Image: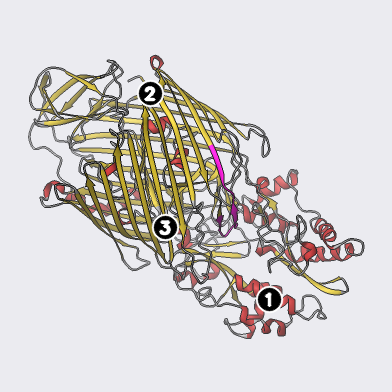
Amino acid sequence: MRKEIVPQQYWILSHQNKRAANGRYSRWWLYALLVLSFSHFIPDTSTAQEATLIEISGLVIDQEKKEPISDVSIQIKGSVTGTITNSTGAFVLRTKQKLPFTLVITSVGFQPQELQVTSLASKLQIALVTQTVLGNEVVVTASRVAENILKSPVAIEKLDIRAIRETPAPSFYDALENVKGVQMTTSSLTFKVPNTRGFNIPNNFRFMQLVDGVDMQAATLGVPLGNAIGPTELDIASVEITPGAASALYGMNAINGMANLITKSPFTYQGLSVYHKTGVNHVDGKDRDVSLLTESAIRYAHAFHNKWAFKINASYLRGTDWVSSTATDQNPNNLNTANPNFKELNGANNNPAYDAWNRYGDENNNAVTIQGVNYNGANRTFILRRTGYWEKDLVKPTVDNLKFDAALHYRLSENAELSYSYRFGKMDGVFQRGNKIQLDNVIVQNHKLELKGHNYFVRTYVSLENTGDSYNLKPLADNLQLTQSSNTVWGNNFKTALQNALATNDLPTAMRIARVAADAGRAEPGTKAFDDLKKTIISINNWDHVNGGVAGAPATGGAWLKQQSRVYHADAQWDLSNKIKIFNLLVGGDARIYEVIPDGNNFVDFSRPLAERNQPLKPGSDDFGKNVYYKKFGAFAQVTKTFFNEKLKVFASLRFDHNPEFDPKFNPRIALLYTLAEKHNFRVSFQNGFRYPALFEALSFVNNGNVRRVGGLSYINEGLGYLENSYTLASVNAFNAAYNKDRDPALPPKTVDNAAALKNRALLDVTALSPTRPERINSFEAGYKSVLFGNKLILDIDAYLNEYDGFLGQVEVAVPNSGKVGSDQAVIDMVADNRSKQTRYRVYTNAKNKYRNYGSSLGATWIFYKKFTVGGNVNFNDIVSNKSSDVFITGFNTPKWITNVSFGNREVVKNLGFNIVWKWQDDFLWESPLANGKVAAYSTIDAQVSVKLPKLNTTIKGGGANLLNHRYIQYAAGPTIGAIYYVAITVDGLLK
């Protein structure tokens, strides 16, 4: 219900037109702004004549407590003009809007009000009613316009300020793990990546994360770096998560879902705020000693005459990282890549081909075959793996995260706000792609310039990425070993020691003795020699080892991950609903250009001859050629219309995307929302979406452990032949197992038995890959939302069915050097002893099968007594099995069942609240290029108690995550996660 009000007084002031100052844009700003040529369609916000400035003042109080309320938002509906109340509940709002207009008054925890201003009168007295009802949240992410969460056309979840304050998780970002439909992957203390609806990976190309419209993806790493460059604890206003495909409106990278992090406006939230958290982890001392975790943040915002405003945020987190140290063997002795014919090698610590989840240097590329070992009266062949190094010895134990951002806002008129913002993040942590990567001093920055009104925005930004001192654990382990000896020398030493040990020992014992002998002289963790050699290797930007593994030779192979990129992006959106009578229309467009600086190791200049691609232009320089560009452009239109007295609402959108490397794509979405009896909301939707390969999937060209990882674009294959002239690695392994069995034992070691090889040629599968094409999804969703029992109970149910076509992944192949696949010489090249006659590639390509997955989620929240609230959700996800195997393992990597239950009261007594969350998830199979295996089920309990000290503007929150310290992992080869106990102090709203 609206109330008529009139303000006390007004002034008439002269209005002067403003002219933008001419400036010199930097190269990247100009590059992005050029694509905004369509911005002249945005409505003109200038005023041709003098306007009247009126001033509205008033007081806002809590109707129940009769106390002033600070930080209440007072906004003029349909404009960008607004203000907030100060610490005494008072406000002053100046505007040039013509009467009549409507004020929208909102505050977290209170029912919103709308007041209509029709004439001028006295000072306002506004009383807000405490909100005890559910379902009043407004979201913008689902359809790119503001709408009630109950009437969203697709599934969407929201964490508002109150939910963020009440979460028992150590940070608001950690709280996403308890949101309906979300699966969180913890790679590091500083690095978490969310996913929804299946096909989870730690470097999640398929899930988009925005902060105030800016994509947080680190381009060359290909993944949003958790919240490493995102909002601080003090500046986050809300988080909206759309599970499932969102690419019909948002384009690339939103095929599995998206998170939209929205920060506080400096006009609305002013003053000085300070936050500090102290916590402890590793409380059981099993992985590392009990360690402190600290995080501090500060925010200051101020507005001048409701015209100018600025804000500054800074935070710093430091702690001791979780440890990945699972010893699970993913190459057990029963596999043909080990020694299945020798049963005595079964059992713990007996497998000489052991490949542990969290040990590096013991992978397939370091397999060594020794022949001619005299055992039980016959010449025997054994497959070995080198010893490798544990992850805990290769990574940094301490990680930190430094964040800074600043923004300047200027209101040009009642419907135009111009802002510039800068964001900086520096982080450490562990990240997993095909291998584990130690992120060290990674820096990501972005600059954003935006003009927005209540029905449009024009935005452009540039993101800068520098991986700093990061390094790859796999080449680090390989080159630590190769500095001691080559694989061939190591294998010969092993064979000699094994033969001698077999004279007096059984086979398992002899194998262990031989390994100690072969490892003699290698750098051992904990020694100065190891630390010095490690420091040398991670400072070299070349992952190949070129000294031949001569004992005592200096390390020439490196592990440095040196990647730099720039992303230029521009987008605009215009709501034309007020200009069209028969339906609502929303239009928009965007353009993005990735610029990669070749590093000679991961990304190269493909215009250079093949032999020169990894070499600098001048000896000793860091110039590896021309920068590489990867582009994408898109536009969309969305039409909405209501029928049957607004009971039925139809959403129809069409998006066009074009990447010059591929054919243009169209993404349609249609959704229907039907409201029954004003409370029951039923929805169905269908959409098609495409995902272009990320930078690493498209353009990588890196040699890593004698296996070159290559992007899927066709021109990268020129002169290499991995698409049309290769065998799959799985078939090469099966071929060699059969070859070793049939090989003539009378032949001398290292002599290839051509007849035995040709006999087993049928086991070799020709890969026959096509150039990479965009990944496609068809997604169907149905859902229901309702509020019941006097708005005290909310139900949210959804179900989905997805079909993926052209699913992108990696397959390892072997290219023969001596002939075409199918020829006799190509078959002989595949023998393990002819490893030098084959070239291995790990190729990003499309799956040949289509994949279907489905699932459902149920969420409920109930205010059952006063302010006591119980809530929870249960989530089911599964995949349909295909009859035929594919060229690679897709990795659904999602538990069938995940559930969360919460119980709390934000004010059980005055200024005292609590919240408890229990989480459980089912066991599931994890598959990836790094590690495969079963991830065990686990459950955790998080809890917090918070005390408010209103006179001090202070809140103290104490709590813990995983209170009972049940150690668990979230993915194969991931870190073991334990308890975190913390106390956090927030002082808010000073110096207003």
Compare residues 43 and 629 and report the one nearer the observer. Answer: 43
Q: Is residue 936 magenta?
A: yes
Tell me the residue at 65%/59% (across/down).
330
The percent position of residue 739, horizontal first and vertical second, equals 71, 77
Going from N to C along the chain, the mark reached first, 2 or 1, is 2
| CA distance for labels 3 and 2 | 47 Å
SS of the residue under disc 2: strand
Compare residues 398 and 61 and report the one nearer the observer. Answer: 61
Compare residues 232 and 539 and report the one nearer the observer. Answer: 232
Residue type for callout 2: Leu
SS of the residue under disc 1: loop
SS of the residue under disc 3: strand
Tell me the residue at 59%/41% (across/down).
977
User: Horizontally, is 571 left or right of 760 in the view?
Assistant: left
Going from N to C along the chain, the mark reached first, 3 or 2, is 2
Mark 3 highlights which residue? 854
Residue type for callout 1: Val
Mark 2 highlights which residue? 272
How would you rate the neighbour count of disc 1 (Cα within 10 Å): few for under 14, some for 14-19, many for 20 or more?
Answer: many
Compare residues 171 and 350 and report the one nearer the observer. Answer: 350
Q: Are marks 3 and 2 in contact (CB under 8 Å)?
A: no
Marks 2 and 1: which is nearer the front?
1
Marks 3 and 2: which is nearer the front?
3
The answer to which image quadrant residue 17 occupies is top left
| CA distance for labels 2 and 1 | 69 Å
Q: Is residue 766 above or below residue 901?
A: below
| CA distance for labels 3 and 1 | 42 Å
| Label number found at residue 500 | none
The percent position of residue 916, horizontal first and vertical second, equals 48, 32
Find the magenta span and give its range: 925-940
Mark 1 highlights which residue? 831
Which residue is outermost to the right? 504
